[in-house]
Amino acid sequence: MAKNKNNQTIWVSRIKKKTSNLFQKVGSSINIDKRLYKEDIKGSIAHVEMLFKQKIISFKIKNKIIYGLGKIEKEINKNKFEFNNKYEDIHMNIEKRLFQIIGEEAGYIHTARSRNDQVITDLKLWIKSSTKEIKLNLDKIIKSTIKIAEKNIETIMPGFTHLKNAQAISFAHYLMAYVEMFTRDKKRFENNLNSLNENPLGAAALTGTSFNIDRNYTTKKLGFKIPTNNSVDTVSDRDFVLDFLYSTSVCSMHISRIAEELIIWSSDGFNLINLSDKIVAGSSIMPQKKNPDLLEYLRGKSGYMFGNLFSMLTILKGLPLSYFKDMQDDKEIVFNSYDNLINSLKIFDEILKNISPNKKNMYELANVGFITATDLADYLVKNHSMSFRKAYQKTAEIVNFAEKKRKKLYELKIEELKKIEPKLTNEVLKIFDLKNSVNSKKSFGGTSFENIKRMIMKYKKIK
Ligand code: ARG
């Protein structure tokens, strides 16, 4: 980049003393917001095109500015742009460079706008495209999860409540639960597009402008749907930032829950899934160890995202309208949450490709803890006209008996069962079969094989 002849700040005509070094250092956000350069240039081009259309600037000036901005974009793309702390942020760095390239006519670019509307235009555009990237990554995870589910429809495992064996379930049904969670995440990000599609440009500093601007024009040019309604609200509003941070928090919370679940399932006590060597770490002292570090990394990362959401809420709490420097931190927070989430999604996809169920152990563990007791109670209701409470009580008696005898429910003899409930016949024994138990849950959304297949089909079709 050519040496800047005019190396003074934009407000030198008003502020006479050199900015304190400390203030320059902390006040500058260029190292963070330079990430917005593409959006900033896009916004500026739309803005000057609108100014020309409205006869606020000439054809020649518009073209010169657009030429200069194009050149700047190339310089930044090629790492040839010299970002300067002194010019505080991406907006002023670009404006300063525009002066060097096209001269005094660069001074027209900031007609009828302020950095206050400019910065949120940039940030909204950035979050919109980042949202697309997040959704693509969520799609990948959903696909990888379905792939494992398809192969495990009849893989039977214990379903847990309170981490105690509850009822038998298909491994695929658990996996499809993750698909539901990630699909909700996608929807949450999609819903945010409503406010992201409102164009802030033209709100100027806080009052709007006396220039005859056309906000509908820039709205269309920039791919927004409508202009925002109120200029003061526009420059004060960071709700769209909170929406984004909340959505990243929820998504990372989902990942954290699943990571914890997989950690438990891969632990020696459970041993229900295997983690391939690609995603485990050894110990420096215990030669036998294979630790689920990567899953723990994911479980922990959600902390950052929650922290970011709370930082932003706290920054905004009690902040009067309209713009304050406090809000400048929004970008660092958003970028951090985005980077962490994308990272976590990519890692999670890698994990999905490196886990496999321990089918035998799953089945064996499913036979622990009288897991078919509820099936027995349901059977008594359906076949021996008992109320559910009565059947519950009878089944509890049978479970107590089995426990005393140190037997599993399926090991009980029909004579033993009859002693507790004389109406029972041999037919009841099929109730203790795990596969039968899983497949009997045919209510919509239940773990029957047919239901799972239907859900897999449904999600395979969604794009
Ligand atoms: N870099 C600033 C930010 O991100 C841009 C807005 C500055 N506006 C102002 N009135 N100082 O918040």
Image (spheres, rainbow, N blue to C red):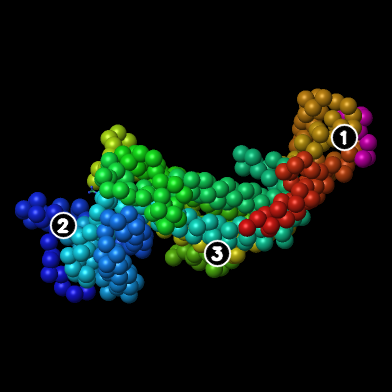
Q: For the residue carrying disc 1, how many other residues have a C-alpha within 10 Å: few (<14), some (14-19), or many (20+)?
A: many
Mark 1 lies within 8 Å of ligand 1 (Cβ measured)? no
Q: In terms of image quadrants, where is residue 350?
A: bottom right
For residue 350, the mark is 3
Secondary structure of residue under mark 3: helix
Q: Residue 152: x and y, percent?
A: 72, 58
Q: Indicate left or right for 61 with 365 as reference.
A: left
426 inside magenta stretch: yes
* Residue stretch rendered in magenta on the structure: 417-427
Distance from the alpha carbon under mark 3 to that under mark 1 = 49 Å
Q: Name the residue under label 1.
A: 417
Distance from the alpha carbon under mark 3 to that under mark 2 = 48 Å
Instruction: Locate the C terminus and report the quarter of the image it occupies.
Output: bottom right
Q: Name the residue under label 2.
A: 10
Q: Indicate left or right for 126 with 99 as reference.
A: right
Mark 3 or 1, nearer chain start: 3
What amino acid type should be assigned to the residue bearing mark 1?
Leu
